[in-house]
Amino acid sequence: MVGIVAFGAYIPMTRLPLSLINGRPAADGGPEKAVAFYDEDSVTMAVAAACDCLGSEERSTIDAVMFASTSYALREKQGAVVIAKALDLRGDVETADFGGSLRAGTDALKAAVRAVASGATGRVLVVASDCRMGAPRGALERNLGDAAVAFLVGSEGVVAVLEDSAAVANEMQDLWRTDADDFTHSWEERFVVQEGYVPSMTRAATALLEKSGNGIQDYDRVALYGHDARSHATVVRGLGVVETQVQPTYFGRLGNCGAAFAPLLLCAALEQASAGERILLVGYGDGAEAFSFSVVGDSAAARLGVGGHLERRRPLRSYDSFLRARGLDKKEWQAGTGPGLAATIRLRERDADIGLIGAVCEACGQVHFPRSRVCVKCHVRDRWQPYRLSDKTGQVLAYTFDYFFPTPEPPAIMTVADVDGARVHIQLSDVAPDQVQLDMPVRFTFRKIHEAGGKANYFWKAVPV
């Protein structure tokens, strides 16, 4: 039996109340969307979703990583290999990127299932993450949100099996973005919905039902990609889906998260499903593809998932904060000029910087970060074993507020945290200054530190447990 073994998600805490876009004050409980903040992008969200998915899974058993995104910034630098390094996976892990379509996430998941079923590989981690932007105050900006989702595909401990799929191709110019564009573009809205989204989604779902011999009533949960709330309701009515079957799309709370959207809806459905249920998933992009999943086991893994992340929220105080976080505000000097961090330094320190790998002394067990030549406790020289800190928890020993560090909403919170005896100098994120306390328990999340040379430089930050 081959299928989904574990699943997880990541939704940024930062929320943009939609009323701020139009210059109105935010109202409690009003519509909003999730937005990646200044230190987040498609890669950092992917790592966070993968951590949520893997939990206590033994990472050395993962044989491949597939990363799907339409907003990963680099064209000749693989995103999957960065994710694998951040997760401290084996050096011989296979990596592949999927892109070019909003169906990239479901394409990667299908490819992973087929790879495991064929015997070509053992366990595959699939991560879909998108951080798309509509033009400020443009038609798309209200609907687009940011999120990531991850699945572990294997043949042992399976909780959901892919039974069947059916796809339709529809070549049309509805949504697009070139390498030179910061923003996703769309043709006229009615054209996109009437000629693209609605017929493609309906045809794909109908084709799957005919192929499998099932009726729509045979599915306990129906998860449909949504272009927006209104057009999603049109497809629901057209397929005859009853209200109790519909998987919520979270418009007004999350937004359309691109290649991660359909997989994220599947993740949300699996969080609520029980063994014996059946899930219909339909993703959209250059046509559509429908998938039939059978839930064969209950997932008991501890994770935040979609539901937990939706409850964690930090609304922005102003629309200007969002513009500054995305680098859309006008400024005297453009960021990212120059070649950036030396490639030799980045290579030499990649274990510590990307993987948050410290060292434990073989003589006394003292943990160090970063690794030094001499143990601070027993003074033994050069007797170390690698020690991964990224999946550990720590506590704040000291902190200070830095009002000079460039951040859209000062101050930046700088801390010293104790992690299994190591003293780690690290920035604290996702918390208001008045909430910081000594001995606060923290965990670690992969984030952008700065941009230079036209690319992001990554490290880890602490966030409250």
Image: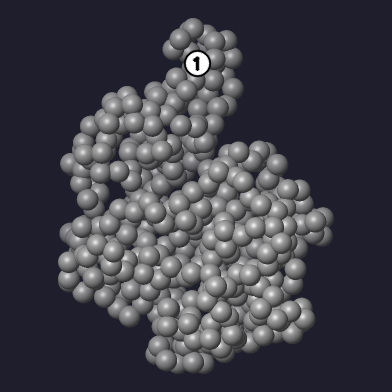
Residue 104 point in image, percent of width and height:
58, 68
The residue that appears at 77% across and 81% down in the rendered structure is: 213
Toward the viewer: 336 or 318? 318
- How is colour applied across the structure in the image? one colour
Q: Compare residues 385 and 206 and report the one nearer the observer.
A: 206
The picture quadrant where one finds residue 146 is bottom left
Instruction: For label 1, count other residues whose C-alpha is less than 10 Å away and answer few (under 14), some (14-19) or many (20+).
Output: some
On the image, the x and y values in percent for residue 66 come to 62, 57
Residue 361 against residue 208 in the figure, above or below? above
On the question of residue 73 being in view, the answer is: no
Image position, residue 178 (x, y; %)? 45, 75
Residue found farthest to the right: 119
Q: Say if 224 sits above or below 422 in the image.
A: below
Left or right of 459? Residue 284 is right
Which residue corresponds to the image point at 44% horizontal and 43% vertical from the top-left?
445
Image quadrant containing the C terminus: top left
- Is residue 142 visible in the rendered image? The answer is yes
Q: Position of residue 200 (x, y in %)?
A: 58, 86
**Residue at the image point whose x is 49% and y is 76% from the top:** 226
What residue sits right under mark 1 in the picture?
Answer: 366
Q: Is residue 76 above or below residue 103?
A: above
Image mark count: 1
Circle 1: element type: loop
Q: Quadrant of residue 166?
A: bottom right
Q: Name the amino acid, label 1.
A: Gln
In this picture, residue 34 sits left or right of residue 233: left
**Nearer the observer, 417 or 158:** 158
Q: Quadrant of the N terminus?
A: bottom right
Q: Does 160 sit left or right of 371 as displayed?
A: right
Identify which residue is drawn at 60% across, 53% down: 7
